[in-house]
Image (spheres, coloured by chain):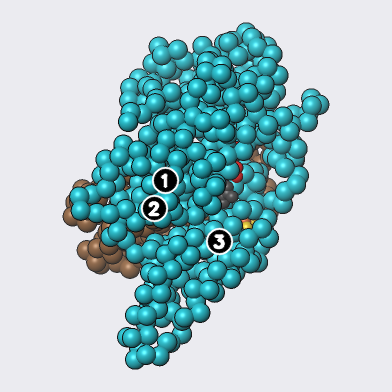
Amino acid sequence: MFTLSAEGQELVKKELTRYETPYSAIIPALYRVQKENGWVPEDAVLHLSQLMNLPASHINEVLHFYTMFNKKPVGKLHIQVCTNVSCAMNGGRELADALCKRFNVKYDEVSADRKITISRVECLGSCDTAPMMQVNDRYLENLTPELAIKKITEMGG
Amino acid sequence: MQQTKLLSEHYDKPEFQNLDGYKKHGGYAVLAKALKMDPKAIIEEVKASGLRGRGGAGFPTGTKWSFLPANGEPRYLLCNADEGEPGTFKDRLMMERAPHQLIEGMIISAFAIGSKKSYIYIRGEYDYSIACVRKAIDEAYKAGLLGKNILGSGFDHDMDVYAGAGAYICGEETGMISSIEGLKGQPKLKPPFPAVQGYLRKPTIVNNVETLAAVKYIIRDGAAAYRKYGTEKSPGTKLFSVSGNVTKPGNIEVPLGISLKDMIEMCGGLKPGRKLKAVIPGGSSAPVLTADEAMKATMDYECLAQMGSMLGSGAVIIIDDSNSMVDLLDVIMHFYHHESCGQCTPCREGTGWLSKIVHRILKGDGEPKDIDLIKKVSEQMMGKTICALSDAAAMPAISFVTKFRGEFEQHLQKARTTSGGVAHA
Ligand SMILES: Cc1cc2nc3c(=O)[nH]c(=O)nc-3n(C[C@H](O)[C@H](O)[C@H](O)COP(=O)(O)O)c2cc1C
Ligand code: SF4
Ligand code: FES
């Protein structure tokens, strides 16, 4: 079964008393799992349920409501290309397609070398730098396919 | 035309991010002033300023605050920094360039409404904004600007950041409340309104980042000075996020009421050889304007409402003649379908149908009755649901197919000719 590191468990316990209700600690706890594991495996829910003394069914509901929690493995670089209006108008969809082709991977799947997952996402609040994408925590802006490929390669993709 | 930088005056200075730099430019002096005022007088000043919520609905802020019950029950202040409305990127700028401006505005607002605890709910993707605001809150605590007995006033206030995890619907105020409560981020039926029963069923005020930051300037300069900007019904300045087909997209701060034409020029105008086709004036939920309408529009709540659209979050998407309106509506409908939380049948099913119908028209598989079907489905989605997402999907759909009907018909025409004169489903 997946378990958090000792440090991770400590953090989750602190979060339990940080807010007015312990339930508010679920999102921070899921973030912690994802940070340690790259994605949130099903058995992490049981682990958190025991650790936090909250119903597993509830934690599971929260997990599945939010798109930022990966419910299956992703590559080391999670590349999320915005394809909402302003980005679509400026080549965001073509950018996403070009990246899939270059890195030989289908949307939302992990590349053979485990390095890359490419997803299409909704507006990331950086429409003035369209087209843009988020790679893990980082925003990369004003892209062309060539520039995006160069940056991904620099990041180890 | 020049920008009018009231809130954004110092955004270009990196030092404005930190407490020391912020203080150099008068930071927290307004808080000191406010803490000596009668809280009721602050609410009156905000009411007199005519400030309207900058998050989308444009509701008068002072009026919202006065809906709080008068008893001493605990109450919460929640800052809405979920910024998910497609086209909007102003709150991010404010949190990254001036986190203390938001915090100062929030403490003043909290003092006015008698709240001892506030949260800033920031969308999870905004990693850098979250880091900037967290750091600024730490600085404020260390300097005695948060916590017990702020600046010796006897007023206590705690503030924290809560990071969302990817859901547009958590920008809707009751969805946001559910999310902070540790539930699925689903909206709740109103009434009761949050001011009466919000976070943990306690009285709660939800305001947008820009609204709370503006409060600082209203208290600094007074309501009358604030009203010198803007129009009678839309006082003050506003940050607009301008994107799409302009040569210099970005955030600009201008008085409400300037012409959309001037705004486009301030953002570098269109690309050479291109013609304006349409403008979405207030985020993707706002009904689209034709080029003719756009040339007559002024950017204030009343003019856009009168044109059947809305100012919304101030996200202005400029669309030139290189775009297909069918294609753009397809993108927008896909978004609402993806983001519907699924609680209400008209929204869950309606957004699904709209997305499907528009997509088949785009792909050349539409049927002649589809345009009217889009209207019919949209009409059935309005005013029937727990929150306004359903309307927010229906309104742009109706506006696109009504104002650009010709383009939709052309797609259907193409479908008929390419399939040997027989429309196929
Ligand atoms: C579907 C939906 C999404 C919304 N998203 C946001 C948002 O991202 N940010 C925001 O400030 N308000 C958003 N709102 C509006 C909020 O419900 C609320 O009216 C606002 O935060 C109140 O603050 P204000 O009065 O300062 O504008 C949204 C509303 C709806 C119906
Ligand atoms: S209108 Fe849509 S998004 Fe809003 S509560 Fe109902 S189903 Fe959810
Ligand atoms: S549309 Fe791509 S960041 Fe907003």
Shown in brown, the chain is A
* Disc 2 target residue: B292
Q: Are marks 1 and 3 on the same chain?
A: yes
> Which residue is more in the foreground, A112 or A141?
A141
- What color was chain B assigned in the picture? cyan
Residue type indicated by callout 3: Ala
Residue under the image location 54 percent in, 33 percent down: B234
Front residue of A95/A107: it is A95
Q: Position of residue B94 (x, y in %)?
A: 43, 31
* Residue drawn at the location 68% of the way across and 55% of the way down: B386
Q: Is residue B1 left or right of residue B372?
A: left
Q: Quadrant of ligand 1?
A: top right
Say whether marks 2 and 1 touch (CB < 8 Å): yes
Q: Nearer the viewer, residue A99 or B292?
A: B292
Which residue bears the numbered disc 1? Answer: B296
Name the secondary structure under disc 3. Answer: helix
The answer to whether A89 is drawn above or below residue A106 in the figure is above
Q: Is residue A20 visible?
A: yes
Please name the residue that numbered disc 3 is placed on: B394
Identify which amino acid the numbered label 2 is placed on: Asp
